[in-house]
Image (cartoon, rainbow, N blue to C red):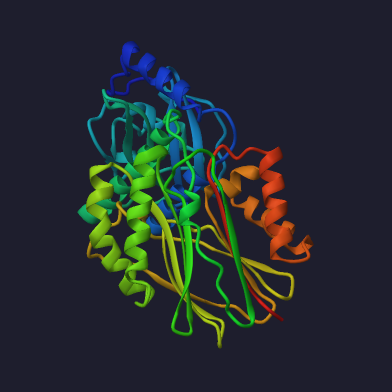
Amino acid sequence: MTVGTGTSVQPTSRPDAAKRAALLAALDVVQGGAEERFERITRIAREAFGVSGSFLNLANEDHLVIKSQQSDEVFTGPIPLRDTFCGRTMTEPGAVLVPDALDDDRFRDMPMVTGDPNVRFYAGVPLRLGSDAVKVGTLCLIDQQPRTLGPDDVALLRELGTWAERELAAGADEDRLRSVLTGLEPDPVDVPGYRVDGMSVPHGVVSGDFHDWHRSGDALVVTVSDVMGKGMSAGLLGAGIRGAVLARGDEQPAVAVAALERQVAPDLGRAESFATFFHGRLDPATGHLDFVDAGHGLVLQLHADGTETIHRSLDLPLGLHPVGLPRNSGSLLLEPGDTLIVVSDGALELWDSTLASLSRLGGLYRKATDTASFLERVRARARTHDPGDDLTVVVIAREG
């Protein structure tokens, strides 16, 4: 992709470009392949807006690197900044909306507009990091058809950008450690006809990763959550969320999560944090599980016939979702012989950081003789392939 001359957008100053490059080097996220923590954001963005492509781009001094993309046409990099929408708008103060690039003097000459892939619509929000709020990239949308965004759409794109910023910032937080305190491990639970087990492998001493299960009458309530960040602050936030969940264990998931969100969102906001969150209620007699998935999306169902389903999330995490706005509720059926595996991000790091790692994990389960041997295989994998993160795995297996 190359562009001609004549654009009116001023290039980023060299000092700003140098700051950008230094910050990205500290984050250590430019190198390496796709990571699910970013893929999740761009996947939600593309599906929420119904566009042909969504991208999380990082800009160093002169080039743009596509860290995550959901697009029919795969773009490779690095790409000269001057050849991109994002590079030409890095000096803009906020969100940039381009309803029709052919009608915009800044972009009408770009080959990606005049030729393949014939981009007409663009919308992007800057990603800022550090005490100086240096712009290090963008979260953006493109489409081949002219279109516009309403105020609510722009607000959602900004919230997704905030999520991306916090995920990027978490990569620089190396001085804090993550883990789940052993005392927060749930007690064993007896559910006739099911095997329920799980584990946490801490990467440090305290973190916001946690899992819980308990009986509520005849039902089984299961929760897995991961608070963004590391160390004591994440651990305190995670403990607060866990306590709020346990206080609402008898409520239906949609009711429980709505009340939980009203309680914990202010704390997450003050801490500039968020939490991905899966909360489900299983009827053991029928195998029917109702759940709410707040930006977690790391749920693998292994079917008795050898197939599998990954249950993804289209909702924002706790702390980013507007309080009071209804969430999507989901449901699934655990047939006899089915197994549900819910994990935190650390499980993906055992392989390649993508959702394909869930299938690898499922393969590990199918080769195991029981849940205990499966969890031991996961621990062994973690010993030889350090995930660099807390690792949580919860298994609910319905006997055949």
Measuring from the top left, give residue 77's x and y in whole percent.
Answer: 55, 29
Left or right: 76 as drawn, with respect to 217: right
The residue positioned 67% from the left and 48% from the top of the image is 379
> Which residue appears farthest toward the front when viewing the image?
183
Q: Nearer the viewer, residue 219 or 100?
A: 219
Residue at the farthest top position: 14
In this rendering, the answer to whether 140 lies above or below 27 is below
Q: Residue 98: image x %, image y %?
A: 30, 42
Q: Quadrant of residue 107?
A: top left
Image spot of residue 270 (x, y percent): 23, 44
Q: Quadrant of residue 7?
A: top left
**Picture residue at 43% right of the left edge, 28% below the top:** 175
Query: Residue 352 at what x, y percent from top left?
Result: 64, 42
Q: Is residue 310 visible?
A: yes
* Figure check: 385 above or below 391: above
Q: Residue at x 64, y 50 (%)?
A: 357
Residue at (31% x, 26% y) in the render = 130
Above or below, 132 against 394 in this view is: above
Q: Quadrant of residue 387?
A: top right
